[in-house]
Image (tube, grey):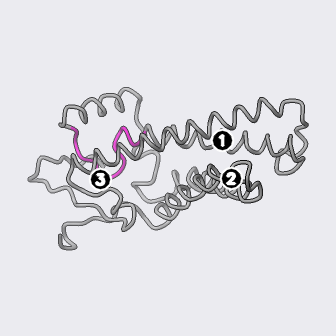
Amino acid sequence: MNSQDKIKVWDLPLRIFHWLLVAGFFIAYLTEDDLLDVHVWAGYLVFGLLIFRLIWGFIGNDYARFSNFLCSPMQSIKYIKEVAAFRAKRYLGHNPAGAAMIVLLLLSLLMTAFSGFAVYGADQGAGPLAGIGPQHEELWEEVHEFFANFTLFLVAIHVVGVAVESILHKESLVKAMLTGYKKRIMPDSSDKPQD
C-alpha cells in the first residue's frame, strides 16, 4: 500500500493515551493488594489519562472528537447486527459499536478510579478522598472490585470486536493504533465514507 492509499486517523496523543491506558489498567489490575504503591500509582495514571481523553474528545483531531463518533444506542445495536450479518460499513474513525465501547469503558474506568480513591481514603487515610472515613470501606471495596472486573470484561469484548472488524474489513486495527494510519476509503469501492 503506497502513501496515497493511507490516511492519518489516530494522532500521536490519542495513540499514546490508548497504550498507556492499557498498561496502566493491567498494572493496576494485576497488582491489586500485593503491591499497593504500584497499584495506587497505576490508578492515578489511569485517572489522569481519563481526564486527558475527556479533554481530547473536545479539542483533539476530528477522529478523536466525541462530536465525530458518538451516536445513539440504537445506532450501535444496528451496527452490531450488520457486523453479525457480515455487511457492516467500514468507518475511518470509530464505528457505532466502537463509540458505545468508548463510552462504557470511560464510565467504567472513571467509576473504578473514583471507588479506588474512596477505598484508599477509607483504608489508608490517603489520596484525594483521604477524609472519607472508614465507615463504608467494605462497600467501596465491592464497588471498586465490581468496576475493575466489569472493565476487564469490556476490554475482552473490545479485543474481540477489534479482531472481528480487522477480519471483516481486511485491515489491522491494531497496526492502525500503532502507526495512526488506516486504508483510505476509495469512492469506487463498496466502502462508503462515514467520517
Q: Quadrant of the N terminus?
A: bottom left
From the image, tell me which residue sits under label 2.
Answer: 43
Q: What's the magenta bit mostly, secondary-structure-wise?
A: loop
The picture places residue 76, in percent across and down from the top left corner, at 36, 32
88 and 119: which is toward the camera = 119
Of discs 1 and 3, which sits in the foreground?
Answer: 1
Q: In terms of secondary structure, where does tag 1 sit?
A: helix
Taking the magenta stretch, the answer to whether it contains residue 59 is no
Name the element at disc 2. helix
The residue shown at (24%, 66%) is: 6
Residue in front for this viewpoint, 86 or 56: 86
Disc 2 residue type (three-letter): Gly
| Residue displayed at 40% across by 55% down | 62
Q: Earlier in the sequence, mark 3 or mark 2?
A: 2
- The amino acid pointed to by label 3 is Leu
Q: Nearer the viewer, residue 103 or 156?
A: 156
Span of residues in magenta? 88-99
Say the numbered circle drawn on residue 112.
1
Q: Report if the CB atoms under discs 1 and 2 are less than 8 Å apart.
A: yes
